[in-house]
Image (cartoon, rainbow, N blue to C red):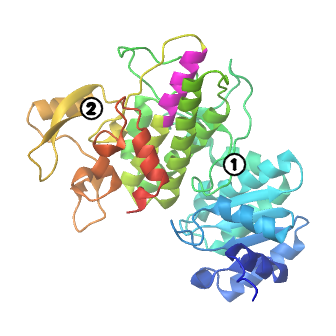
């Protein structure tokens, strides 16, 4: 008796009949009239498009878009642009065949739609059509730069990446679970640090400043989501632009942590349901940036820059430059946590610090009073999630295995 077809073979077989595949669970996301509109557009395109919408669930049939795209392409054996919407509203695109620039255009075209305000509440069909138009027009990168121009201006967290002593910039693949794109390129981020720490941060023309974090702190959820998305893109570029000698095992360990942090940040961003999750994205980006800073310090012959977390009470406050004693909710045990100066002073003055709120329940609570990965780990500052050196790699590992979804 022949074996049952695999999920990848099922999707590939359906795509041989039609370039649009919708899992039954998502049929209502694209009504019949909209499907006809999308199919008509696909037929007019000179580039083959394969549009796939399936549920992505940790431990389910498909856990991430990039994996699914690769498997389906391997079974279908047809080149073109594979365009994948996710339940969070983002789009992932990956092109097989064509030039490198055409592959990059596919990346930018999918990422672009999330930055266009007029498409925030647009039907899925309209977002797909816009992505397809941008990809085939050959100007997706220019449109993306225009749509994200506000990110290059103070007080937003990311400045435009320029050439520096580490070499020319280049497109970087970004995990599909991040922006919902298989690859995104273009920006870089470097977090501002106080110079009175153990060792000054390596100078870099791109700075995530205190003003930036202040802007993030006061942004609405949609604005914060866009800033977090840009930070994930930026970290990916930073990782790709950092070379590590093969004879430096510690450097290899650090760059691996940076890559894992980047992938973890993407996973959280794609599944983010509120401000605490988006703050978690920035914490993970910060962990990766710390690792990159250490790598580059080593490469220049300096001493490794130790990692430094963001404020325990609210990561959007910025650097944790002080230590305070904190007692877990419902526990008699006290632990030492690191906080920004303002929160540390509030605790010492027996006042409540301005904590990040979780609004997912019946009433707003400090995030550490809610049940989440962030409350269980203090954004990586305590518990079994952080390594002894404070690098945050334990938190990264827990996100990669899906703990942020529970």
Q: Nearer the viewer, residue 21 or 71?
A: 71
| Residue position marked by numbered label 2 in the rendering | 338
Check disc 2 and report its element: helix, strand or loop: strand
The answer to which quarter of the image holds residue 132 is bottom right
Within 10 Å of disc 2 (Cα), the crowding (few <14, some 14-19, many 20+) is many
Q: Position of residue 337 (x, y in %)?
A: 24, 34
Q: Is residue 178 above or below residue 242?
A: below
Figure quadrant of the N terminus: bottom right
Circle 1 residue: 144
Q: Is residue 362 above or below residue 110?
A: below
Q: Which residues are magenta?
A: 288-299
State how many labels appear: 2
Q: Position of residue 208 (x, y in %)?
A: 48, 31
Point out residue 167 in the picture as x, y percentages from the top left corner.
73, 23
Measured along the vertical axis of the image, is residue 81 above or below residue 267?
A: below
The residues bearing labels 1 and 2 have C-alpha atoms spaced at a distance of 38 Å
Residue at x 16% of width, y 47% of height:
328
- Tag 1's secondary structure? helix
Q: Residue furthest front?
A: 1
Query: Where the C terminus falls, by quadrant?
Result: bottom left
Residue 52: % across, % down: 70, 72
Query: Which residue sits at x=73%, y=49%?
Result: 143
């Amino acid at each position: 008796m022949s074996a049952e077809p695999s999920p990848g073979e099922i999707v590939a077989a359906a795509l041989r009949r039609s370039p649009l595949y919708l899992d039954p669970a998502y049929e209502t996301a694209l009504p019949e009239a909209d499907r006809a509109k999308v199919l008509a557009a696909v037929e007019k395109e000179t580039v083959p498009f394969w549009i796939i919408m399936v549920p992505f669930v940790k431990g389910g049939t498909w856990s991430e878009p990039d994996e699914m795209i690769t498997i389906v392409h391997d079974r279908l054996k047809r080149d073109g642009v594979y365009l994948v919407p996710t339940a969070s509203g983002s789009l992932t695109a990956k092109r097989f065949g064509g030039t490198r620039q055409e592959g990059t255009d596919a990346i930018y075209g999918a990422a672009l739609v999330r930055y266009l305000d007029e498409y925030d509440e647009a039907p899925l069909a309209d977002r797909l059509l816009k992505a397809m138009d941008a990809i085939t027009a050959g100007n997706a990168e220019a449109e993306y730069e225009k749509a994200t121009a506000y990110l290059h201006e103070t007080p937003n967290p990311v400045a435009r990446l320029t050439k520096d002593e580490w070499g020319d910039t280049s497109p970087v693949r970004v995990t599909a679970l991040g922006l919902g794109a298989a690859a995104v390129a273009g920006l870089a981020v470097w977090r501002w640090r106080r110079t009175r720490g153990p060792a000054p941060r390596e100078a870099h023309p791109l700075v995530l400043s205190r003003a930036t974090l202040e802007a993030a702190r006061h942004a609405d959820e949609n604005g914060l989501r866009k800033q977090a998305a840009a930070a994930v893109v930026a970290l990916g570029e930073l990782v790709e632009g950092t070379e590590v000698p093969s004879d430096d095992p510690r450097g290899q360990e650090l760059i691996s942590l940076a890559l894992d942090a980047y992938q973890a940040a993407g996973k959280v961003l794609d599944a983010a349901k509120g401000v605490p999750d988006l703050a978690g994205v920035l914490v993970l980006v910060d962990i990766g940036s710390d690792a990159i800073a250490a790598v580059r310090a080593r490469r220049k012959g300096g001493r490794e820059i130790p990692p430094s977390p963001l404020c325990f009470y609210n990561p959007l406050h910025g650097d944790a430059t002080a230590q305070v004693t904190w007692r877990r909710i419902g526990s008699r045990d006290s632990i030492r946590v690191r906080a920004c100066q303002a929160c540390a002073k509030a605790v010492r003055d027996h006042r409540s610090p301005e904590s990040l709120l979780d609004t997912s329940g019946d009433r707003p609570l400090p995030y550490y009073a809610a049940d989440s990965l962030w409350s269980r780990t203090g954004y990586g500052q305590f518990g079994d999630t952080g390594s002894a050196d404070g690098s945050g790699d334990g938190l990264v590992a827990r996100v990669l295995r899906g703990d942020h979804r529970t």
